[in-house]
Amino acid sequence: MTNLLIRPGRLDELHTVEALLRGASSWLASRGIDQWQYPPHRDRITVALEQGVCFLAFEDREPIATIQVDGCADPEFWTPDDDPDTALYVHRMAVSRKAAGGGVGARLLDWAADLAAAQGKRWLRLDAWKDNEGLHRYYEDAGFTLLRVVDLPHRRSGALFQRPSGRVPDISN
């Protein structure tokens, strides 16, 4: 993958964002993972599109991924001690199956970390499904640290991750 264009989604692309999220939901279900097994939150996605914080990634003019990056810290997870205003937060990241395995997710996370740095934020944060250990490893491989798990009975998410804003140095060489 060479040319990845990331830009804010438009309201008329709501169906595209929903399709990417439904595709991720179906893939998770096929692997026995019950994460995202509900219709996408159209109301939340619409607001994110209106605010310019829901992004689409394109390769050869085809939408292959979506990510929401904003300053909205979930108050059930991020406390005043976390200094929530020092971070941007990732929500609803999904990559199409045909683009999976090509590093698109990692590139989106790097892009989001750069966005956080450009906005003067110290951290890029996200919450993940508490019992999706594969996803936890994925985020750790992308430079995130697991801070804690918030176990609320009405929430399946609650594994809280953060990484410094800006690029994570490549230590594999």
Image: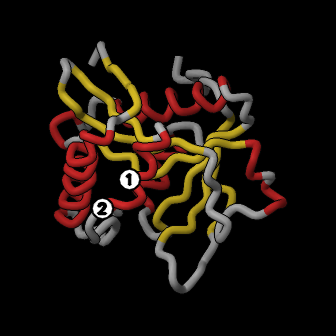
Q: Identify the amino acid type marked 2.
A: Pro
| Residue lying at 32% horizontally and 60% vertically, measured from the top left | 42
Image depth: mark 1 or mark 2 in front? 1
Report if the CB atoms under discs 1 and 2 are less than 8 Å apart. Answer: yes
Where 70 falls versus 107 (above or below)?
A: below
Q: List x then y, in percent, for residue 1.
A: 27, 19
Disc sitting over residue 45 in the figure:
1
The answer to which of marks 1 and 2 sits earlier in the sequence is 2
- Furthest residue toward bottom: 153
Residue appearing at x 42%, y 41% in the figure = 54
Number of other residues with Cα within 10 Å of mark 2, as a class: few under 14, some 14 to 19, many 20 or more: some
Q: Is residue 130 left or right of residue 39?
A: right
Q: Considering the numbered disc 2 on the image, is that residue within a helix, a strand or a loop?
A: loop
Task: Name the residue tied to disc 2.
Answer: 40
Residue appearing at x 58%, y 37% in the figure: 143
Check disc 1: other Cα within 10 Å, few if <14, some if 14-19, many if 20+.
Answer: many
38 lies above or below 95: below
- Compared with residue 104, is residue 90 higher up or lower down, i.e. above or below? below
Horizontally, is 163 left or right of 126 in the view? right
Q: Is residue 42 above or below residue 131?
A: above
